[in-house]
Each structure stands twice: as C-alpha cells, then as structure tokens.
Image (spheres, rainbow, N blue to C red):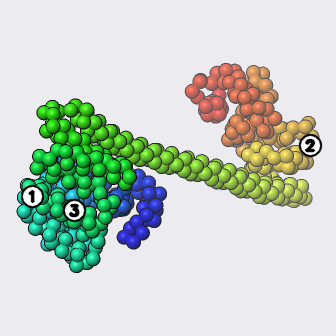
Amino acid sequence: MKHNTDSALSILESIEPSDIKVDSLRAKLIFLRAYGHMKQNRSMIADSLISFAHTYYKGKEINKNIRSGNAFAWYKFWVGDTPGAISMLDSLAGISNVPDTIMAETLRLRVLLGASEYQGRQIIPLAKRLLNLETDSMRIIEAKYMLLAGYEYAGEPDSAIHIINELIDFAAKKHWGDKHFLFELERAQLLTEKGKNAESDSLIRELFRKAGPDNGAADILHLQHAVNAINTGNMSKASRHLALTDSFASILKRDDVDNAAFHSYNNLLRTIIDFKQTGRISLIHIAALNNRQIERFNRMKASQWESERGALLQQSRALALKAESRQKTVIILIVILLALLILGGASWIIIVRRQRERENEERIEALQKMVDEYKSAPAKQESELTKSSALRNAMLKQLGIIKMVAETPTEQNREMLRKISSIDGDTNGELVDWKVVFEIIDNLYSDFYKNLHAKYGDVITQKEEQIIVLMVASFSTKEISVITGQTTSTIYVRKSSIRKKLGVPEKEDIVRFLLSHSDD
C-alpha cells in the first residue's frame, strides 16, 4: 500500500468483506481499501463500509482511529456531505496525544476542505498548526499556501502578501521556474485585492516580459489586466483584454474544469463592463454564466451517479460470483456426501453379506455335525436313550436344529433340515417330520400335543395344530411360516381362526390360555 498502491488495491478489491467473519480483519480490509482510494485520489463512492472500520477502531488504536476517521471524512466529501466531513475532521483534530505525522494528515484534509468552502478565519489557526508539524520542504510550501488562502478568504491581503513574498523568495532560491511564475501571478491577484491595480499591472507586464506574450497562462494574465482596468474605470481597456483572453483561451484549450472557471470569470466581467457602459445589466451574460454553472453541476452529478452505478455493478458482480461460488461449493459437497453415502452403504452391504456368509457357513458346519451325530445315534447303547435326561437332550437338540433353520432359512439350511427329518421316515416334501415334532413337543411339554389333539382334534385342522405346537416351542410368526411353508399373512389368519374355535379371549395369549386350561 505504501510503495505500490495500485497492486495493493487490486489484491484487496478481490476480497469480499462479508466473507471475513473476524471483525478486526474485516475492519482492516475496509480501512486499507478506503485509505488506498484516498491516497490515489480515486472515487470513494463505494467505500461506505468505512464507517464500520472507523467505529471498530474508536477507542482502540489511535493511529487507525485517526486515519480511518480521515478516510470516513473524505468519503463524506465524495458523496456531497462536505459540512459533515469538516465536522468530523474538527473532532479528530481535537484528539490529544496523536503522533505529528498522523495529525498532519488530518489537518491537511481539514484545511483543504475549508478552502473549498472559502473559509478564512476557521482555517488560519489550523494552517498555522499544520505548518508547525510539517518537516518536508514541499509539505511546508503547501502548508504556507493553505495559510495564504486562509488570509485571502479572511480579507487580510497584507498577511497574504507577506506569505506570498516568502514563497516567491523560496521558489527563486530553489530555481523552481514554474512555481516562481505561479507565485508571482498569485501576488498580482493579491495586489488587485488590496486595490493596488497599477502595481498589479506592472507585475503582469513583467511576467509577460519574462515568459513571453504567448505563455501558458496568457489568458489568465489578460483576465487580470481586465479586472484592474474595470477597477480603474477603463472599460474599453477591459474589453480589449477580455477579447485577448478569449483568443488565448481558444488556443490553449484547457480542460473542462479550468475552461468552465475561465468562462465564469469572463462572463461576469462582461456583465460588469456592459453595466458600466450602458447602465443596464445584460441578462444574456448572466444566463450564460448561470447555464455554465448548471452544466458543470450536472456533469459533476452525472460523474457521481456513474461512480455510484459502477460501484453497485461491481458489488453486484462480486455478489453474483460469490453466490455462484457458493452454489458450486454446495453442489460439490452434495456430490461428495452422496458418494460417501453410496460408498458407506456399499461397504455396509458387503460387510453384512460377508458376515451372513460366515454365519451360514458356521451353521452349515454345525448342522452337518448334528446330522453326523444324529446318524451315529442308533449305534449307541439303548440304555443311554432310555434315560430321561439323555432323551430330553436329544429332543432339545433336534428342536434347536429346526429353530436354527427357521431363523436363517437359506436353501442349504432347508436341505440340511430335510436330510435330518428324513432319517427316521418320509417327510412327504415338507421340511420336518411332523410326527417326530409332535413327539418332541409331548416329551418336552408334558404331552401337550396329545392333550390338544384329544380335546380339540375335531375342531381344529392339522395345519392349525402345527401352528399351535410351534407357538408352544416359542417360534415366531415368521419362523412358523418358514417351517410350515405358509406365508406370514396366512399364519395370522389361521391364528385368528384358532382363537375363535378355541374361544380364546381377544386380549389373551393363545399358548397361555391353552396351558392354563391343560388340566381341563
């Protein structure tokens, strides 16, 4: 920012302040951008956020408090609030314990804006204070020139002439030809203000002699001659010099601002000359003067509107780019999230399948081992099987095999259960030998099937008996559907039928009801 302001600004302007969530960093970004615009004398229409930075630095860092305040005041000037800018700079100038280099910046801006408002008495003490703070020779010259303006606007031409004489001597010692010429021209104007028209004319002629009749300020010099002539009542001489003023102005072709200022003076002097010669005021000259002022004002407004429009367009582009960037980021995040979900889901499915495969393999091995043990059972001594504990263990093991297949009804498990069930007889295509199952239930649950068949055999069907005995053995509806080869919905229908046929209350469990009435 100090050595290459343009490069610094190009970096800072690529950053969106709203993207920065830390207030200290956000304030610093806004302050540096506004300070850079002020340093480069660029439009500050788009620097409205400088108020945030100045508010943040108040009462914290004295240097940034003053400098952000200067930038805020300059922003106010750009948007047309010169009185507000001056008021802010006055409050900043009143702060104590501020480094001289920082306070000098504030005073320069304050005196400059005061001069633009033609303040005299107000800027004299400020310009003197600034003069005491400046150390650089060029800055000292600028401060003296501002003090000169203060004296001139305050109506103190003697003090102003004293300052301009010092500036002329300094420029002569430094061999600053251009500045020496401008200071001499300023002295001629001050002599006119003091009423010394002859001395002013003499000095102007000396300037023409040194710089030539067609120098770069010839139109201004002739204009000053015209003013002196009007002051002495020589209207014909004033008209001649005004004619020369127009001639040189058309040759020199100054920029719009200087040209507008020149025509403002020229038209005003012509109006005065007409009044002196005819005793009447010509509205044409006044209208021309007024129209030029209106044109200048309109151009200033148009420039300001264009700057504001450019700032708004820049902000809109920045917001659009930001929204587009965020949209792309959201899409990328969604795609990544979906990819992770798909990958996670696929991984979970693979893990579950592998786990089931391992469990199936373990069950198949266990079933195969049970089949082998069951096949070898007849070779055991009959006395072992007749023992009640051994018989019960064998029954429980066989029921456990059926339960295992019902829990995991894979084709391998079904086939294994058919092999086990068909060892002692024919299953008639079913998974189990129901005769053996009924026998197991009777042995494990105190002749439950025998009593059920004896009491309700003429009421319930064989399929319903199968469902009841499996319910007694704690098989779930899904497991019952696997073993009986029926759908779960069919099992629910048959359970409702059983409840009606046996007179089981709606809220009563069928198995609990049958066990509680087993004595009957």
- In front of the other: 147 or 251: 251
Q: What residue did someone put label 1 on?
A: 196
Q: In this view of the protein, can residue 86 be seen by the observer?
A: no
**Could you say which quadrant of the image residue 443 lies in?**
top right
What separation in Å lies between label 2 and label 1 (alpha carbons)?
145 Å
* Camera-nearest label, 2 or 1: 1
- Which of the marked residues, 2 or 1, is nearer the chain's N terminus? 1
Q: Name the spot of residue 515 as percent of width and height, x first.
A: 64, 34
* Image: 96 above or below 26: below
Question: Decide: marks 3, 2 in contact (CB < 8 A)?
Answer: no
- Of circles 3 and 2, which is in front? 3
Task: State the image coordinates of residue 300 (x, y, percent, origin top left).
Answer: 33, 44
Residue 317 circle label = none
| Amino acid on which the number 2 mark rests in the picture | Gly
Horizontally, residue 156 falls left or right of residue 408, namely: left
Vertical relation: 427 (above or below) 189: above
The answer to which quarter of the image holds residue 495 is: top right
